[in-house]
Image (cartoon, grey):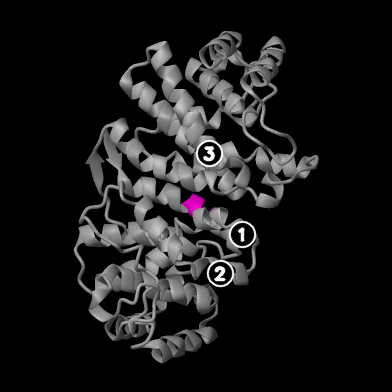
Amino acid sequence: MLFNLANFLRGISKALDFVEEDLFGVPTNHSKRIALIAVRLGREMKMTSKELFDLIALALLHDNGASIKILQDSLRGSTLERQNLAESMKKHCIIGEQNVANFCFMTNPVNIIQYHHENHDGTGFFGKHGDEIPLMSRIIHMADKLDLDCRIKNAADDSSDRDRVITYVKDHEGTDFSPEIADIFILLAEQETFWNELTDKAISQALLRYTPDFSIDNSYREIREMTKTFSKIIDAKSTFTELHSSGLAEKVGKMTTYYGFNEDTAEQLLIAADLHDLGKMAVSNKILDNPGILTDAEFNKIKTHPGVAKICLEEIQGFELIVQWIYQHHEKLDGSGYPQGLTGERLSFESRLLTCLDIYQALTEERPYRKAMDHRAATMALRKMATKNLIDQQIVNDIAQFFQS
């Protein structure tokens, strides 16, 4: 299929901004702002369209390893101090570089994310300095520090605050920042349009204009090499879902073989399993990790996650069925599910299968309010739901038989 990489990037970047805002308290559109500053610098440096595409992609994904590293270290919170602690950890750069290994870049960039915290004077995590640091890393590094240390969004909204940003760049030229890149930024900062595009109301359309529109002819199997990476990031949102999407995908793979699905349908279902909880990136961990009874407001927030995933993914050509299955994975046969309240006759077999396996996977995992169930207990719970006409009885029977020890 013809797969539009730009649309995929935009969808994923929306989700990554959600998780950064929740875990770190970073202002909205952080990743987009890094990408927009980076592409403006790259254009001034006469990068090719393929280089610019990769620069934008890497800027959007630059901190993809941070939430995984935070999970590993059991860090939670929304203060800037916690973010600085996470950002100072060398490991998240390495994890981030490993995570993007299967992304379909145009120019085969190497070590961009790994070195995106290196300072020009060699005082970064890896001791690289000057031209030893890849150009894209140097550009992303400057954009990232301007957003985090200078709160460049404030200067975009308030013209009287822009001199502070320019002074910061001049003060760090030759130490944190490459002199060449710093000089180009200062020239860009003289343009009113540069600042206008960085505002929250304008940034999405601005980034859309600057992103080269590349599509690749890939199979769903090849596309899934990318979505497996993002399932790790989604699962890292909470300590209780560390293996949820990968576990669900494993079970989906086995059941699609059991049912004899064709390869395309099977791979689409695997992609849906990888991304089914993408929308939970927009749900606070205070809700996801709550051991008590949720309030109506908290539960209503959780119920938004299929819709958020739909917003992130619906512009991707070839993902129509995938988005449908993700959007429907909390629907019930009697119409009591969400977000649309669909009844059984409007739910495909694939949607029903994903729903049943998602519930089974969740029941066999620990949650803040209960211990993990074994196969027998989980199957009993599924059967009760099927008896109430909530989920598909035959699929439940097949799960009970197929996954018994």
* Residue linked to disc 1: 75
In this rendering, the answer to whether 172 lies above or below 112 is below
Q: What residue type is labelled 2?
A: Leu
* Residue linked to disc 3: 243
Circle 2: element type: helix
Q: Confirm or deny contact between disc 1 and disc 2 (CB under 8 A).
A: yes
Q: Earlier in the sequence, mark 2 or mark 3?
A: 2
Alpha carbon distance from label 1 to label 3: 18 Å
Quadrant in the picture for the N terminus? top left
**Magenta span covers which residues?**
14-18
Horizontally, is 255 left or right of 329 in the view?
left
In this rendering, the answer to whether 47 lies above or below 374 is below
How many other residues sit within 10 Å of disc 2, few (<14), some (14-19) or many (≥20)? few
Q: Which amino acid does label 3 sit on?
A: Leu
Q: Which of marks 1 and 3 is nearer the N terminus?
A: 1
Q: Confirm or deny contact between disc 1 and disc 3 (CB under 8 A).
A: no
Circle 3: element type: loop
Alpha carbon distance from label 2 to label 3: 25 Å
- Asked if one can make out residue 61 in the rendered structure from this viewpoint, the answer is no
